[in-house]
Image (cartoon, rainbow, N blue to C red):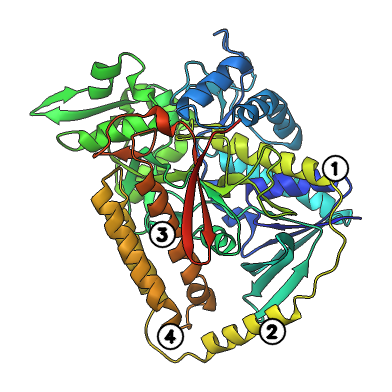
Amino acid sequence: MKKILIIGSGISGLACAIRCAGLGLHVILVSPYPSERAQSVMAAGGINAALNTKGENDSVELHIEETMKGGCDIASRTAVEGLCRRAPQIIHWLEELGTVFTRDSNQQTDFRAFGGQSRKRTAYAGASTGKQIVTALVHETRRYECMGLIERRMGLHFYSALIKDDTCCGALLYDSKSHRLEAVYADDVVIATGGQNGLFGKTTGSALCDGYAAGKLFMQGAKLKNLEFIQYHPTTVETSQKRMLITEGARGEGGRLYYLDGERRVYFMEEKYGERGNLMPRDIVSKCIYDAPSQVYLDISFLGKETIRRKLSEVDTLCRNYAGIDVTKESIPVYPSVHFFMGGLSVDICHRTNLKQLYAVGECASIYHGANRLGGNSLLSAIYSGMTAAESISGETPDASGCDFSAYISEQENIMKKIFSSVSRFSAVYVKQDIAKIINSDLGITRTGEKLRSGIESMDYYLSVVDKLKFDCDISPYQSYSLEGMITLARAVLTCAEVRKETRGAHIREDYPERSDNFCCSTVISFNSGKYETEFVKEK
């Protein structure tokens, strides 16, 4: 029986594990924390599928076209077609597992409109869709655990892949309880570690998703793609710890954006784009809010208490508890925040990376979203990518040749001993906070070549000294050993943004404000002997 190692237990990792187990494969599912702490539970808005239950003549073909258009036509059409065609089946599967979607007046799964889409095709569970889906998938995972097909292990952090001759044979993991490194060998390895929120500090996502795994794998030979495309969610509110997301469902239910000109409300999105202006693609809405002359507000109070409590209860609760706002009476002050990463590990339509036996799924993989993601497509792609990788793995024969990694493991154990013996008071967390300041300054909603080059110089400086610094490891050795991979990833992101000399989707260059046909392709970056090498590749 093939043994599959899946690193990460959010929705994409769970979906992959369940599908692998259903195909008779043995799965080792590892993560630092329970699935209930994964970023997936924060997904509020919904999941897309063209089921045409609203009498709007929706279709899979229209879902495909709007996904391609939202991504500015650089995503893989073949991959997008597979994603959208399987979406209805995925909704039915989730319902069979016990996902409780919001119902309409006919007690059928309800659908609402989301940004960049002309039809109501987003199924939702109030404002807690991610929580509902995670709960259903966890229950199904436990069923396979009882059958002995899934082995669940927590408290394990990714340290590095075990790679020889461009083939991945497993991974080296850090056990936060024993404080030791553990080698886990497998026929195939699936990375499901989420996005790169940790590079930016305060975002709408979990700081536990920091991009280290992608950065380390990049250093080990894995190619990355489209890192410059970073989606800002238009409507968030700030708290002491993070930016809290106001779901796009609030605008899908009719919420309106405005700013004040004196005492007059200016509904700027509607004035510029018409009746559906509040549901333009996220990059457009974010840029318009960024350019607004004063504070922008989101008003849902006119929807009434009953609708708000029934369909947007978490928005109501969030605003009351964290901002002291009664949304049934007051408008919500909003501002864009880093929310989703279209870029990540470069994968093909089977979710294979360029390294044999290494796969990537979910937000850490780049294939479906192009230059900008449609709201509701992230949960869909998380589940679909996990299933697709599992089915690809099931149909392939692994390289049976054994590899001896004892020398490499011994070398890495010595590095960890040095980290533990460090008595310095210098904080790795402080460096990460400084990196976040630099990234947010030089790689914001709008960019310039000058700023991007400044950011690259800053990352090069940190990379030149990172192996010479000693860090206080009282908080966690992970904070120290993950630093170089995160800085390397940050440098790669800045490099991709610098070489794309145009404005497209979520990548807005003030010095190149127009879209160019020369860049109607993906940015692929490789790390070779310390050099960052980029190429533009046309997707199929």
| Tag nearer the camera, 2 or 4 | 2
Distance between the Cα atoms at labels 3 and 2?
29 Å
Q: Is residue 229 visible?
A: yes
Q: Nearer the viewer, residue 284 or 150?
A: 284
Quick check: marks 4 and 1 in contact, CB under 8 Å?
Answer: no
Distance between the Cα atoms at labels 4 and 1?
46 Å
Of the numbered discs 4 and 3, the one sitting upstream in the chain is 4
Q: Secondary structure at mark 2?
A: helix
For the residue marked with disc 4, what is the amino acid? Lys
Q: Residues within 10 Å of mark 4 (few under 14, many from 20)?
A: some
For the residue marked with disc 3, what is the amino acid? Arg
Quarter assignment of residue 335: top left
Residue named by callout 1 = 395
Residue at x 61% of width, y 24% of height? 49
Q: Nearer the viewer, residue 334 or 364?
A: 364
Q: Is residue 101 above or below residue 337?
A: above
Kindly identify which numbered label has been placed on residue 410.
Answer: 2
Q: Secondary structure at mark 3?
A: helix
Q: Residues within 10 Å of mark 1 (few under 14, many from 20)?
A: few
For the residue marked with disc 2, what is the amino acid? Ser
Residue named by callout 3 = 491
Distance between the Cα atoms at labels 1 and 2?
34 Å
Kindly identify which numbered label has been placed on residue 470.
Answer: 4
Q: Secondary structure at mark 1?
A: loop
Of the numbered discs 2 and 4, the one sitting upstream in the chain is 2
In this view, the residue farthest toward the left is: 262
The x and y percentages for residue 23 are 86, 43
Q: Quadrant where the C terminus lies?
A: top right
Q: Is residue 73 above or below residue 34?
A: above
Q: Secondary structure at mark 4?
A: loop
Is 173 positioned to the left or the right of 66 in the image? Answer: right
The x and y percentages for residue 228 are 41, 45
